Amino acid sequence: MLDYMQFQPGQKLEGTPVDYCFLGACTNGRIEDFRAFASVVKGKKKADNVVAWLVPGSWLVRQQIIDEGIDKILEEAGFELRLPSCSSCLAMNPDKVPAGKLSISTSNRNFVGRQGPGARTILASPLVVAASAITGVVTDPRKL
């Protein structure tokens, strides 16, 4: 797995550049997850080198995000709120992470090819995904 992920034994993940950040789908696409994500990105801007997919777990959650104004916080930080779906969590649609690219994701599994053929996935909390989307590297949100 280390070879597949292109990591070395004992390598720290913090500081590793990320290409994609994924928050959402049925696991970790709850209103609480979006509130946490927004708390980190509020007043900041998404890194230019990061593609971010923010996908509510349901239509109800999407409406809560809008009702609470979280969508505005996300938009001001450079993010787009997407429609509820599996998205890149399962990569059974156009939302695939390209081969060799690294995603930091709140999805619930990171087996080989989960987010797309040849894609590499680090599983993380919504807070870590948010911080990483801002900095462009795996980031401990407590350090922002």
Image: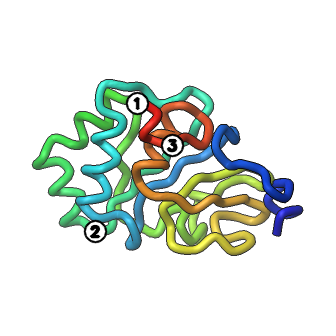
Asked if marks 1 and 3 touch (Cβ < 8 Å), the reply is: no
Tell me the distance, in whole angstroms, between the alpha carbons under discs 1 and 3.
20 Å
Q: Residues within 10 Å of mark 2 (few under 14, many from 20)?
A: some
Q: Please, what secondary structure does the residue beneath circle 1 have? A: loop
Q: Residues within 10 Å of mark 1 (few under 14, many from 20)?
A: some
Compared to 99, does 17 lie above or below? above
Residue at the outermost left position: 67
Residue drawn at (58%, 36%), measured in percent from left and top?
50
The numbered mark, 1 or 3, whose residue comes first in the sequence reads 1
Q: Which mark is residue 140?
A: 3
The numbered mark, 3 or 2, whose residue comes first in the sequence reads 2
Check disc 1 and report the residue beneath it. Answer: 78
Residue drawn at (11%, 49%), measured in percent from left and top?
67
Residue 31 percent location from the top left of the image: 23, 60
Please give left or right for residue 20 compared with residue 82 in the image. right
Q: Amino acid at mark 1?
A: Gly
Tell me the distance, in whole angstroms, between the alpha carbons under discs 3 and 2.
28 Å
Q: Which mark is residue 58?
A: 2
Residue drawn at (29%, 32%), measured in percent from left and top?
42
Please give left or right for residue 116 compared with residue 135 in the image. right
Residue 30 percent location from the top left of the image: 29, 64
* 3 or 2: mark nearer the eye: 3
Q: Amino acid at mark 3?
A: Asp
Tell me the distance, in whole angstroms, between the alpha carbons under discs 1 and 2.
22 Å
Residue 4 or residue 95, whichever sits in front: 4
Q: Which mark is residue 126?
A: none
- Please state, as top left, top right, bottom left or bottom right, where the N terminus lies in the image: bottom right
